[in-house]
Amino acid sequence: MPRIDLRSSQLGKEAAFKTWRAAVPQYAISIPNDDLTDFAMDLSAWLLQKIVFTHGHTSPCRLERKAESLSDGYDNIVFLLFMKGLWVGEADGRPFSSEDGDICLLDASKPFHVVTTQASYAMVNVPRQTFMEAAPDVTIPHGHILRSASGWILAEHLTALCRYLPNMHKAEAERMAAATLTLMASSLAELTGTDHLAKGSLISAVRLRVERHIERHIGSPDLTPDMICHELDIPRSTLYRAFSPFGGILSYIQKRRLDAARALLFHPEEHRSVGEIAQALGFGNVTSFTRSFERQFGCSPREARQSGSTYISSSQMLFEHWRQAVARGG
């Protein structure tokens, strides 16, 4: 079963820290005062079909997904189990803090940061498309802490994986991957209810509903603010207010379409032309698509496809990128 190990006790403190940062370029990682004197980390990661499962221990650090990095196309959903240590952070403009056994849900298409003391954790990385296929009607509340019976069951499951995964054979581990996806979807299903929406911020609740609607209709040429307001029965002013932090609803829709286009361009089994991809994602013509793509990513769609970008579009590619970084570090 594919596995990666990264240990400061083997590589040395400086090499381990540099390798860690190289393996996850989508995040900015730092340690207090840039002082590696007491730095230590021990990380193991497994590729389980469509997800990457990680278990690790680390010295105090800060991990950040910066707004200026969002155009890199990294589009995973992250379930982060805080097993030990104090964790505090901010996501979607809202602060959060954790207790041992809490799970935090993070959307890597949005900014966030988390700061931790000496800590232990388990983490599941799932490509957005994989998660949407497993849970098409589930919202993805960025920065939400799962404190419910279903969330605690998921936490116990992830803790058990840390303990038993090293001894599983491949077929058994793949069955556990399917079970993990099911439990993750179940832990969020209750958040779609009206009780949850009533308790939270109206704007955040609206944003979650609209984001889910956009993902399900990303290729429709009729995906407009008017259509969204009509389909979801949302006042136009509320819709615009909910997406003002993202440059407006039209800007958000275009970014999601461009991210989807980038994923398709780098997919090894995607053979449609640039024009066909543009049409499938609701762009009016290939010229406007190309101009928008160049503004977002700094190159044309054809140049991006030919360059063999480092964009991580699947768990397998993510895991391979980690493996190569660790191999270079070692």
Image (cartoon, rainbow, N blue to C red):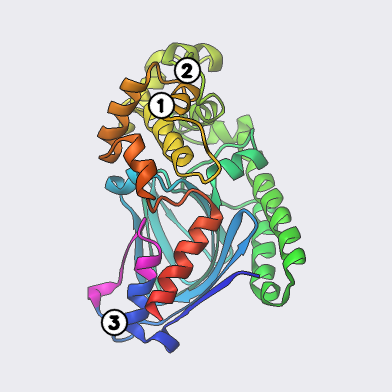
Q: Which quadrant of the figure has residue 109?
A: top left
- Bounds of the magenta span? 20-34
Q: Quadrant of the C terminus?
A: bottom left
Q: Exactly how many numbered labels are in the figure?
A: 3
Q: Nearer the viewer, residue 106 or 218?
A: 218
Which of the numbered marks, if any, corresponds to residue 164?
none
Describe the element under mark 3 as helix, strand or loop: loop
* Three-letter code for the amino acid on which mark 3 is drawn: Leu
Which of the numbered marks, if any, corresponds to residue 223?
2
> Where's residue 155, x and y in %?
64, 61
Tell me if residue 271 comes above or below residue 324 in the rendering. Answer: above
Q: Nearer the viewer, residue 276 or 27?
A: 276
Q: Quadrant of the N terminus?
A: bottom right
Residue at 34% x, 57% y is 64
> Where's residue 107, x and y in %?
47, 46
Mark 3–mark 1 Cα distance, whole angstroms, equals 42 Å
Mark 2–mark 3 Cα distance, whole angstroms, equals 50 Å
> Where's residue 181, x and y in %?
67, 51
Work out whether residue 49 can be spotted.
Answer: yes
Mark 1–mark 2 Cα distance, whole angstroms, equals 8 Å
Q: Are marks 1 and 2 in contact (CB under 8 Å)?
A: yes
Q: Are marks 2 and 3 in contact (CB under 8 Å)?
A: no
Residue 24: in magenta span: yes
Q: Which residue is mark 1?
A: 253
Nearest-to-viewer mark from 2 and 3: 2
Q: Is 286 left, or right, of 201 in this rendering? A: left
* Three-letter code for the amino acid on which mark 1 is drawn: Ile
Q: Which quadrant of the figure has residue 154?
A: bottom right
First of labels 3, 1 by sequence position:
3
Which of the numbered marks, if any, corresponds to residue 36?
3
Q: Are marks 3 and 1 in contact (CB under 8 Å)?
A: no
